[in-house]
Image: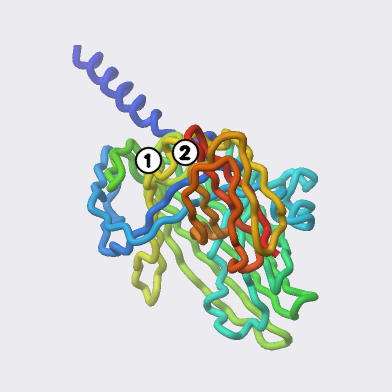
Amino acid sequence: MKPLLLIITILWNFSIIGQTAITKSDFLVVGDSIGVSSSTDFTIDYTTTGANSTWDFSDLTENNQLFEIAHDVSTAGFIIGLQFGVGAPNQYKASFYQSFDGLPLAQLGGLLPVNIESINRMVKTENDKVTYPGYSLKVSGQQVGFRSDTIETAYILPLNYGDTYASRGYTNIGFSPIYNAQIIQYRQRESTVDGEGQLLTPFGTYEVIRIHHQIEEQDSIRIDTNPWIKINRTFNEYEWWAKELKRPVLKIETEVTFGNEMPTRITYLNGKSADLNKNTFKVALFPNPTSDQLTIAYNENIKAIHIYSLDGKKVFSQATNSKEITIDISYLEPGMYSLHAMSENGQSFNPIVIK
């Protein structure tokens, strides 16, 4: 009898762990928008983990909200489309792109005499892995792309409790002919699925697995003929993933400074727009590109219009109850934005260009 009970217990535990396996279907696809809250509760305990864990972060204090959006590569311009679009080599054919702030540009201060207006990271999702094939930057009004010489693998799929993997990425970012400057980014990633159990946040309770990424980054920056500037950084990313939610339910990012690991960012799902079907309609936008006014039209009443910059910040919001509305956007800076329209029955994200 005892051997039978032991077998049943082992099989039951295996089935519980198996339910939290993360697969391709649990990641973003083009058009997905994920409501995210951020917190500055940096005393949070991110070290406790293991099997059958309970992480109670239900008392996190929200200090900001944004949307994480998977942008269609075809909206990033002709050059980016050639590098990462449907005609690119398979390893560089990105599934979507997202805003990214991980390049060491803040450390440059005023050393780089060009205006970098936005940075995006290309993401490629496949059945067995998720990779980062390169970046795009808007530099002094020009959109430029950079393929990674060595493509970093962010996730090996499916992800199960106990999995470990390693990867590295190498990208040479040159600003010529705009300016004689160069950034070399070299990242080494060690990832471990080190926990599984139940996660509590202010917006719900989830069955999750936890992934710990440790990233050693060795960057080199050169301007004109000056000596190379070396910037070595160590990051940690702690992610709690649940099924079918498209991004980590909770993500804690840290950086090691003078031997001390300190949290730098905490983000978690807030369920915004979760009750709406994604991409259920396509609004008409005209003119697009535009510089002053934009008209939005649909065959049923639009309830609200929001505009987001590529880094997910809301820059315009207006309630309405009309099939057609014209809005003034002349105060917005030139660039690419995402227009979020909502009706009673769904929502739609559409790229707009302000010139």
| Above or below: residue 5 compared with residue 50 | above
Residue 91 x/y as whole percent = 71, 46
Name, please, the residue furthest toward the left: 2
Residue at image position (34%, 43%) is: 195
Residue at image position (57%, 37%) is: 279
Residue 24 x/y as whole percent = 54, 36
Query: Is 245 or 320 nearer to us in this picture?
Result: 320
Q: Is residue 285 left or right of residue 8?
A: right
Residue at image position (58%, 45%) is: 349
Quadrant containing the N terminus is top left
Query: Is 115 or 48 nearer to us in this picture?
Result: 115
Quarter of the rendering containing residue 46: bottom left
Q: Is residue 75 left or right of residue 27?
A: right
Tell me the element at label 1.
strand
Residue 259 x/y as whole percent = 36, 73
**Can I make out residue 5 in this image?**
yes
Q: In the image, what residue type sits under mark 2?
A: Leu
Number of other residues with Cα within 10 Å of mark 2, as a class: few under 14, some 14 to 19, many 20 or more: many
Q: In the image, what residue type sits under mark 1?
A: Ile
Number of other residues with Cα within 10 Å of mark 1, as a class: few under 14, some 14 to 19, many 20 or more: many
**Can I make out residue 252 in this image?**
no
Quarter of the rendering containing residue 141: bottom right
Query: Is 146 or 244 nearer to us in this picture?
Result: 244
The reply to whether dot 1 and dot 2 touch (C-beta < 8 Å) is: yes
| Above or below: residue 236 compared with residue 201 | below
Q: Which residue is mark 2?
A: 159
Tell me the element at label 2.
loop
Q: Which residue is mark 1?
A: 209
